[in-house]
Image (spheres, helix red, strand yellow):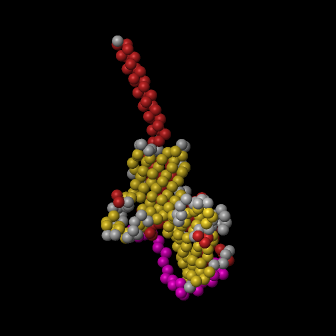
Amino acid sequence: MKQITNRKITTLLMGLMLTLTGASLVQGEMGSLNTAKIEQLTGLKGALNEKEGVFKVSYPRNDIEVTAAGVKMTPPMGLTAWAAFKKTGMDTMVMGDMVLLQDQVNSVMSAALDNGLDVTALHNHFFWDSPKVMFMHIGGMGDEETLAAAVGKVFEKLKETSGGKGPVPQTNLDPLTSSLDPKTIDAILGKAGELNKGVYKVTFGKTTKMNGVEVGNAMGVNTWAAFVGSDDQAVVDGDFAMYESELQGVLKALRHADINIVAIHNHMSMESPRVLFLHFWGVGSTKELAKGLKSALETQGDKQ
């Protein structure tokens, strides 16, 4: 009887060891992130979700005082920036959401793009908020330490520009007093536009399909740029239409030209190929602004 008991105990112990070993292997595949290194490189404390194998670092925006429709907003109400890391095979994936005031957006976006991260969306989460809060989503795939260091640069720029230290491009212009020469813009962009009440607008069409029907320029699938001012001092605003694979190239080109991005989102759903839109705002000479737009257009596959 004693031998049977010992045999049973041995069997149970072996089964338990196999179970623990199996659990350890699963945990190793999902939770093998170097969380201490991620915290060091991002400069933030994080928490591990063991069930999903995700390590998330957070930065509550306690440094800003925001109200929305008279309600005092706090970090738990959606004012917390974060980045989440997940191991996937030999690589690591990161996704995140940056909580930014308007003057911080483009500096932080450049920090993300220049350090190898993707910027995937830029939009608001609230109405009637003061000061205005924007949310910039980031992502990336690759080496864990490289991604963590890049995210660290993003948060570093976020902190550096807080307290109203971000750049705000300002100039006083009235479309009715525009004196710019459209020929300068035409020569650079390679296309003539239309002058309407002091605003010179150039449009480039793009096509996609919705429900099997081709839609294009006349249906709003287009890039357009509107110039106001003089040759030396002008403003350009507009909307860039891009296939999904073209977004990062266009963003980098516009930011390298010091043209500000003010929104990234979709205008349609279920279209194929998928088209994303970004809205922009730039201040400078018409020549430099047009050159910046041209560099972004040239990153697109269709070479509009």
Q: Can residue 5 be seen in this view?
A: yes
Residue 180 in magenta stretch:
yes
Q: Where is residue 60 in the image (x, y as percent from the top left)?
A: 37, 58
Q: Position of residue 239 (x, y in %)?
A: 55, 70
- Horizontally, residue 278 falls left or right of residue 104, namely right
**Nearer to us in this view, 18 or 43:** 18
Quadrant (top left, top right, bottom left, bottom right) of the N terminus: top left
**Nearer to us in this view, 237 or 157:** 237
Q: Can residue 107 be seen in this view?
A: no
**Nearer to us in this view, 153 or 220:** 220
Q: Where is residue 216 in the image (x, y as percent from the top left)?
A: 62, 68
Which residue is at 38% across, 60% downward?
Answer: 78
**In the rendered view, would you say 91 is above or below 222?**
above
Which residue is at 62% across, 63% downward?
Answer: 213
**In the rendered view, would you say 51 is above or below 287?**
above
| Quarter of image, res 235 | bottom right
| Quarter of image, res 12 | top left
**In the rendered view, would you say 27 is above or below 277?**
above
In magenta, the rendered stretch is 163-186
**Principal SS element in the magenta part?**
loop
Residue 9 in magenta stretch:
no
| Image label count | 0
Q: Where is residue 209 in the image (x, y as percent from the top left)?
A: 61, 62
Which residue is at 37% across, 16% downward?
Answer: 6
Quadrant (top left, top right, bottom left, bottom right) of the C terminus: bottom right
Which residue is at 66% across, 78% downward?
Answer: 192
Q: Which residue lies furthest to the bottom in this view?
A: 177
**Nearer to us in this view, 212 or 249:** 212
- Horizontally, residue 296 falls left or right of residue 23, namely right
